[in-house]
Every structure is written in structure tokens, then in C-alpha cells.
Image (spheres, rainbow, N blue to C red):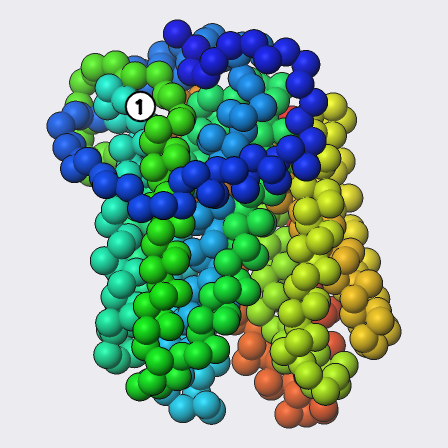
Amino acid sequence: MPRFARNDKGMFFCSFRTAYLLWEYYIVYSTPLKMLSLCLCSAMLDHRSMKEVASNTSSHTGANGFHSIDYIKISIFGFALAALSQSLHTIILPLRVLDFVTESEKATYLGILTFAGLIVAMVVQPIVGAISDRSGFSWGHRRPYILLGAIAAMPFLAGIGYGGSYAAILITWCLLQASSNTAQAPYQGFIPDLVPGGKRGLASGVKSLLEIVGGVALIYPIALFMDRYSTGEGSSWLWLALGALGIVLLGAMVATLLTVKERPGVGGSQVPLLPTLYKSFKIDAKANRDFIWFLVSRLLIIMAFTTIQTFALYFIKDVIGVANPAAATAKFLIVAVAGMLAVVYPAGRLSDKVGRLPIVVASGLLGALGILLLFFFPSYGYLMLSSGLVGISFGAFMSTNWALATDLVAKGEEARYLGLTNLATAGGAALARLIGPVIDFFNRYSPNLGYSVMLGACFIYFLVGSSLIMKIRRR
């Protein structure tokens, strides 16, 4: 049986249609729904059985059996995950850290907090992905873990509000990362599981589009709530912000459970847990050389993007010297997001026609150009121009690079390999934060020299990352 309703031939799926369907799904599924309890009553399949499932799966997914609405169905959960991550990282966690540490120590403690959470994500995703690949639930091997992870995240999300010390917030944040990544790893297996090979670029573009929109959709209302929050006062606004994130996450989870139809798992021999965990991080480097190059390239380019995002406000305040650096940073991000949205869909679709590598390389070189503009022309006008270029670069990169990942994953181990991709994503994001002390070190020698070093590092990340991706043989 096909996973989705048949036919709907020749429908041209444009970004305006995507935005409309996203809004429709947000309205329909963002209300709280009563959940059935989860019953874990199945065993994991062996590797051979999963290969058979993957083979049978691909044979049931024809070009005419995957509709435009199905791209939304398999990606809507990514919208919620992005909203959760960006709202917490950008607004809620920095303000909660200020509840317990002094202004002079806030960057250090926030860096420790976010770094620890990223390490947890790097460990959890490949493990859960491997277990998901081998699971044999009657209603699929992805959705049970999405349900488990989303439900488990709720008490830890509340714990961000309840935490009465920095240590409590740190532990709670790590547990929230573990639970949310328990849901994210299987979710990432939907594209290789369900989408025909010739449509994976488009599917990756829609996935990236929803994640970008999710990352900014709740930032403004969450900021309004948190503006009214201060230490010991206005705690109801903090709970309103956390509650909104919880409702969105649960709504997207329910939408995914009800609308995504996986092929039922088949029975198989039970795989021992410890060997599965060991194999979660094991890659045959000789057989998967292209995937290794892909991981290193992705890590470097993610480092470049994350460095810019993390230290943008400080750069704008100290180098550009605008009167309202926070407002300027907001405009910087808005222009960047506009650039992302403009290209994330067409880049994914174009990659299905011309190949992944040319677009990934071009996106890295465009990002390097944006960095050069800031290095040689540090003014407000060039800042906005650079933001647009970096946004276009990031949108094209995330859309096409993810499509490349789905092309390179080993058959029958899709979720595990896409979980390993998070080693590059989270690893790059974590390593990018370590340049903070370097910036401060060089700034002590000469005013703003540290920011020049930062931009130079980003330029190198872009160039080297783009060069390494060209070593991939599969085009």
C-alpha cells in the first residue's frame, strides 16, 4: 500500500503554496489535544530485516504516489523543533542565566550551557537513529520515537521555568536536549524513507523552509513575553512563553502522528542494545569516504554561519557603532531570513536537476563573499548587504546540503547516518562558540582586532568547507 493518497499529477509546488499550507497546519494543529498513552511493546529488527524494509519501502513510493501536501506532512515537526530551539537559545536561556550570574560572567555561563546541550545532542541523535532504524512497531519505526521524545520534553521544558539555580537549569537543559533529539533523529529519516529519489531535493527544500520559518515565527511574540519578565517579577510571562512553545511542539507532534503514514514494521530477530549503541557511531570510512568528506565540509560551513550569528550583536555594537545595536541586530537577522526564504525552495528543486555539489559549493563561496564585504567595508549599509548574501548562502546550503546527505546515507541505516550528520551540525555550532575568548584576546591588543580575526576565520571556514565538498565522487 502507498503511504499517501495517490495521483495529484503535475501540481507545481511553489513557496507561496508552502507558506499557505504551513499556516493552515499551524492553525489546525496548534490546539492542545488529549494524547493516548505510549505502549512500547516491540523489539528492534536486525540489520538485514531493515534493509528488506527499506527496499520494499522504496518500491511502494512512486512518483505519482507522493503529493504536494505530503512534503508538509513529513516536515511540520521540524517547524516546531526549530521554534523551540531558536526561542530558547536566543531569548529565554540568556535571560534565565541572568537570574543566577552577574553581567560580567553571563557570556561564559551561557556558552557553557549551550555547549553542554549541543554535546548531548551529538550523542543522542545517532544512538536513537540507530535504534529507530531497527525498530519494528506496527505503525512505523519513526513515529513512536517522535511521540516518546515530544512527551518526554514537556516536563523538562517546564523545568526551565522551575529551575532555581544555574546548575538546575544546566541539568534540565541537557535533559530537554536529550528528549527533543530523541524525537528529532527519527523525524530526519522521513525523507529517505518516504520520498522518491528524484524528489528528495524538493523535499529537503521544503524541510529547510519550514525549519527557517519555525526558527523566526515565534521569536517576536516570545520576545514580547520575555520583555515583561525580570528576576523575581512577572514570572507568568515566562510561563506563557514556555507554554506557547509546548503547545506548538505537541501540536506538530500530533499532526505528524496523524498524517504521516509509514509502512508497518515487520517482525525480526531482536538486536542486543549494546552492539546497537556501539554501531551507532561506527562508520566504515573506506566504504563511506564521500560521507566523511561531507561531514567535515558541513562542520566547517556550519562553524562559519554560527560564528556570525553568535557574535553579530557584539560586532554591530563595537565595529559598526550604531546607536541601537539590538535593533540593528534584529534587522540583520530579518534580512538574512528573507534571503534564506527566497532561495531555500528553488535551491532544493534546482539540485534535483543539476546535482547537489554545484549549489553547495556556490553557497559556500557566496558566504565567503559576504564576509569579505564586512571585512573591507564595515558600515551599516554593507552590513545589510552582507546579511542578505549570507542569508541566501545559508538557505541554499541547508536545502541542498541536506538533500546531499539523504543521497549519501547507507541503505537501511538512514536515521543513524542522518543522526551522525548532527555530529557536524552540533559540533560546528559548539566549536564556533570557542572563538569568543580568541576575539577578546586580540581585542586586548588592538581595538576590534578580534573581530577581524573572527571574520578571517569565517572566510577560511567557507573556502575550505566548499573545497572539501568537491572531493565527493557522487555528483
Screen quadrant of the N terminus:
top left
Q: Is residue 176 above or below residue 29?
A: below
Query: Residue at 43% across / 49% down in the picture?
Result: 81
What amino acid is found at the position of numbered circle 1 in the picture? Answer: Gly
Query: Residue at 43% across / 10% down in the picture?
Result: 2
Q: Is residue 4 above or below residue 142?
A: above
- Can residue 59 be seen in this snapshot? yes
Image side of residue 123 versus residue 295, left or right = left
Residue 108: give x, y in percent of width and height. Answer: 44, 80
Q: Is residue 222 above or below residue 347?
A: below
Q: Is residue 473 above or below residue 118?
A: above
* Frontmost residue, 451 versus 203: 203
* Frontmost residue, 184 versus 326: 326
Residue 458: give x, y in percent of width and height. Answer: 69, 64
Q: Which residue corresponds to mark 1?
A: 140
Query: Residue at 52% across / 32% down in the picture?
Result: 72
Residue 235: give x, y in percent of width and height. Answer: 32, 77
Residue 239: image quadrant is: bottom left
